[in-house]
Amino acid sequence: MNDSTDDIQLIQDAGNGDNEAFGILYERYVRKIYNYIYYRTGNVNEAEDLTAKVFHRAFRHIKTYNQRGVPFSAWLYRIAHNLVANWYRDRSRKKEVSLDEQLPSSFQFDFPESALEKSQESEKLIKALRRLPPERQQLVILKFVEGLSNMEIGLIMRKSEGAIKSLYHRTLESLRKEVEKIEYPNNRKKKK
């Protein structure tokens, strides 16, 4: 039995009040949803709080979940996306995040020089990512952090696979330009 088929039974059981079935769904998806939210907010505490809200909302509405050909994970990502959008709207600004919050504590390097170099590259990339519009941030996170296919991303973002491919290429170009702006901030002034 694959995860999708297994999910259907678990969803039905959870909808009928089986808390253990919902617990299995929670364990199956909590890490992915947390990672998605963490990379969107850049804040461990906010990611934990919003992840809890995603599953609380899913638990409250599991009885009304209707698959309609969309995987359960896509439904969870949509809930997460909406909560993150509300989080940004409530704060009305994107705050800069310190490097300590950006890199998971599980990152371990053998050489201090290597760690510094990698952390500086990660810092630039995350800073550039935060400059992109939310939709493009979402695409990058789903593609590179979660490793989802264009088809799966399309289901989550409610776009065709072709639209995701196009958005993906435009996003990578925008991300490259943002990294260049961070690496060479004075070049913009010279071009004017």
Image (tube, rainbow, N blue to C red):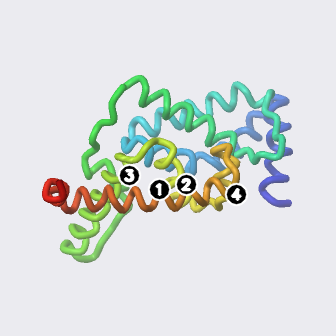
Mark 2 or 4, nearer chain start: 4
The image position of residue 31, as x and y in percent, is 55, 50
- Mark 2 and mark 1 in contact? Answer it, CB < 8 Å: yes
- Disc 1 on helix, strand or loop? helix
- Disc 4 on helix, strand or loop? helix
- Residue of label 2: 167
- Mark 3 and mark 2 in contact? Answer it, CB < 8 Å: no
Which image quadrant is residue 112 in? bottom left
User: Which image quarter is the N terminus in?
Assistant: bottom right
**Alpha-carbon distance for marks 1 and 3?**
10 Å
- Mark 4 and mark 1 in contact? Answer it, CB < 8 Å: no
Kindly identify which numbered label has been placed on residue 171. 1
- Disc 2 on helix, strand or loop? helix
Foreground of the two, 97 or 135: 135
- Residue of label 4: 151
Which image quadrant is residue 59 in? top right
Foreground of the two, 68 or 22: 68
